[in-house]
Image (cartoon, helix red, strand yellow):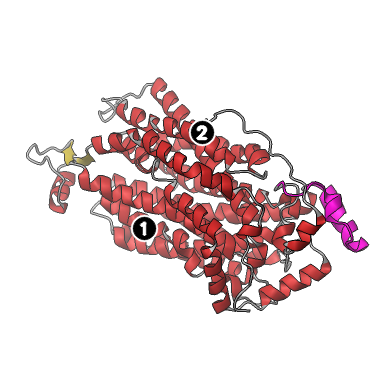
Amino acid sequence: GTGTGTPPRPTMVHRTRAHVRRNSSAADLLEGNVLGDYGTDEDYYVNEPEDDKSRTSKKQAAGFRGDYGSIALLLLLYTLQGVPMGLSASVGFILQEKGASYAELGIFSLASWPFSLKILWAPVVDSLFVKQIGQRKTWLIPLQLAVGFSLLYLANHLGQLISQKGSDVKTLAVIFLWIYVLLASQDIAVDGWALTMLSKKNVGLASTCNSVGQTAGFFVSFTGFLLLNAYGSVGLGGFITFWGVVFLCSAFFVALKREAGTGAIVTASERFKQTEGLNNLTVVGAYKQALSIARLPSVLTLSAVLLTRAIAFSAAETLTTLKLLERGVPKQHMATLSAAMTPVSIMLPVYISRWTAGSRPLDCVTKTWMLRTVVALGASVVVLYVPSNISEEGGYIPWTYYGFLYAWLSIYAGLNTVHFVSFMSFYSKVSDETMGGTYMTLLNTVSNLGYKWCETGTMFLIDAVSEKTCVGGSTPAVTACATETAKTQCVSSGGTCRTSDWPFHVAVCLTPVVGFVWLQLARQPMDKLQKGGKAKWKVRKSPGR
């Protein structure tokens, strides 16, 4: 069945020393107890030099102690990654408030597509670097500086791009597209660094740092800004300026971190071989490497899962908040609800890491999938029952409505987070460290593409089939918003353009049906992906070296 109870603890599968040697690479050494592929560390360190053995044993005994600094830096980098994402969401809210259509918002959403296309330049980031600086720091330091200066430029030109007379959506999209290109490049470097920055037994925490950091960054720059802005504490320009300065300062902390060539739990001979291999990888070889990864049958199967998993939930996730704002729910109230949900989004990945860091993290997805599809139906309910007098002067929203809205948002966000962390943990488990960041980047790229094509497609599709009417205008003759001229007349008369709700409700009500069909098709492939060890995820030859 779908199962809504607590996922079982993953069982440990004992592997022999011969198995380790047969697949000897740094990626095999990442499997360890956290990923459930070896019975004991005693088996693992047989015949290693005494010095290496004692050092690694002490490192393991220290728990998180040896990784505190690395975890803190990963959290910082992933948090900063979430900040511009939150800022773009805030700008989207403001654009909708200024009368932007779903099609215009769809154009603006294209700005975030670089995260879905970053594999196109990931091999460059992976293979070109200055040895004296470090493979990851060569990119991270200038990227942090570039994002900072880009945000400062945006802050100084906001008045020309967003105004009551109209917004330049296309220019805004281009600017945020550039910022997202920088962030996607940063993500490539951070994902690759995380695999070697953390010790073997803590590498599963990379997905937790990713989820917690991006959630915190998004919260601060989206929810935080909307709350502060609603009460007149800060303007968008000043807020973006502040984060531009923070990005510039973050480059200093990246520069302070010592970058090792390989993971911590490897022998001296293995460390030498891996470092030499990474340093000798050419750009052409890196692209061949990425293509070799993409051709693996297991990667093709996983890609099919990732490219289709968001279809069922796209309407609920993409349009619910926009519908609530359109029907008059104040954006500061939505921001307050989002703030109240943040502890759930941050603490849940930490709590579920006991299962998602195990040998079968995708079981968390299949066991809660249908529950999530049923909960998604709440999107239609919260839009249908928005109080009718909310748009009137002094309109009152009952606390019972906000209580239900908060409960629904929290439950759905929790399930969404479980699925996100489960997939991220699985990427960390199967990625071959000897491929640098290319492997993780490929999987993350396909994952993001699966979300983005559904988000943008939903925006354009709903806009195409929806009827647009003018609501609240002082001129009775102005009733439509089908064209740009009609929309301008509506706004000029003091009205707002509202999109019909029925396409949204139809799409949301189909969620359990589409989700059930998807689960029936994907359950068996996902089960097979988690069986058979790491051999099927490895490229046998490393091309172009």
Numbered badge on residue 536: none
Residue 281 percent across, percent down from the top left: 63, 76
Q: Earlier in the sequence, mark 1 or mark 2?
A: 1
Tag nearer the camera, 1 or 2? 1
Q: Secondary structure at mark 2?
A: helix
Drawn side of residue 135 relative to residue 481, left or right: right
Give above or below for 163 relative to 334. Answer: below
Q: Which residues are magenta?
A: 36-63
Drawn side of residue 439 relative to residue 53, left or right: left
Residue 348 percent across, percent down from the top left: 60, 37
Query: Residue, x 47% and y 51% (percent of image)?
Result: 306
Q: Taking the image as drawn, is residue 342 in sight?
A: no
Residue 116 percent across, percent down from the top left: 45, 59
**Alpha carbon separation for disc pair 1 and 2:** 29 Å
Give above or below for 159 relative to 423. Answer: below
Task: Please check the rendered image and state whether residue 18 is part of the magenta-colored stretch, yes or no.
Answer: no
Q: Taking the image as drawn, is residue 196 in sight?
A: yes
From the viewer's side, name the closer residue of 91 and 52. Answer: 52
Quadrant in the picture for residue 172: bottom left
Q: Amino acid at mark 1?
A: Leu
Q: Which residue is mark 2?
A: 340
Q: Amino acid at mark 2?
A: Ala
Q: Which residue is mark 1?
A: 110
Q: Where is the C terminus found, in terms of image quarters?
A: bottom right
